[in-house]
Amino acid sequence: MRSTPSTSSQVNQQASASNLAANQLAAKPSGAASGTPAHVQIKPRDRSHKIAAALATNWLDDDPFLTAFFNALSISFPAGEKFFIDSIRLFKDQVSDPVLIEEIKGFCGQEGFHRREHQRYNEALCSARGYDLDKLEAPIKKRIKMVQSRFPPETNLAGTVAIEHLTAVMAHQLLKDNQVLRNANPAMAELWRWHSAEEMEHKAVAFDVYRAVGGSLKARRRAMRRATFFFSLEVMRCLCYMLKKEGLLYSFKTWRRGVRKLLGKSGFLHGSRALYKEYFKAEFHPWNQDNSELLQGWSAETAASS
């Protein structure tokens, strides 16, 4: 049945009102600002990892592509984690919930240790492999500096929220089973699982701060689209640099095998798309994806090996 002009207008008005309500709902603080479950503690763990020898090898399944992929991720972390800390600290005085205030402290502590360990990781990697660390880091630092100078703090916080979700999704993939790191060097597996567990613990802190200070759904979605593009771009740039230095950039076999292990049915990123897409829902909160059992499993493994 064909709609009359008046009926179409009413439908459009209702849709606009619905979208407005969704944006207001996403921006409105909800009582206690912290959405992290009470049983999840955001605890900074000051750990160091002896990985220099492993970084001279294809430490992940003897696969140069997968090894370079994770090494490329590491290159982006130190500058990125400083950006996250800086972005949240600008809003800590606007947060009144004492639980969330303590979680901000835990977040900054965890990210500070991650930044230190990945800086050591990157320096050892470049020393062992002959990579130019300044060349790898410079574009990342330049983009972050540009973002901080051109955009308001609210936009930078939205970017932090977005990338925290990206890292939480990857953390979920690494902790959900041992398949990805099963054939990894043990010291490297320990580092990545430690980092993943803490990313999972604090995955809602930036989101809850953003919600508490009135961040909008529209800006949150826009920040995710931008963050996904630039994060992927930087990882791919570093990955290609590393493969080129290893003489494998144009090796079809290397790419085919590596992409299959990354995106195939049993690959690292298989199944992550659904977790990623939930971010765009108006009612999304990071702990709608409850990873408590994964954290408990990691804690039990850590306790048993210590």
Image: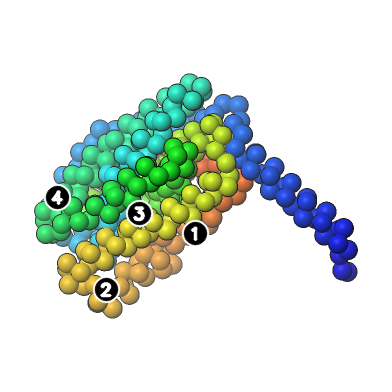
Tell me whether the residue at label 4 lies in contact with that at label 2, contact meaning CB atoms closer than 8 angstroms: no
Mark 1 Cα-neighbour bin, 10 Å: few <14, some 14–19, many ≥20: few
Q: Which residue is mark 4?
A: 124
Q: Secondary structure at mark 4?
A: helix
- Reading the image, the residue beneath label 1 is 273
Task: Please give the residue where the numbered disc 3 appears in the rendered image.
Answer: 178
Numbered mark located on residue 301 in the image: none
Q: Where is residue 104 shown, x and y percent of the image?
A: 41, 29
Q: Which mark is first along the chain, 2 or 4?
A: 4
**Residue visible at 45% across and 39% down in the picture:** 152
Q: Which mark is residue 254?
A: 2
Q: CA distance from mark 3 to mark 2?
A: 23 Å
Q: How far is disc 3 from disc 1 in space, using C-alphas?
A: 19 Å
Q: What kind of residue is marked 4?
A: Ala
Q: Nearer the viewer, mark 3 or mark 1?
A: 1
CB within 8 Å, label 1 to label 2: no
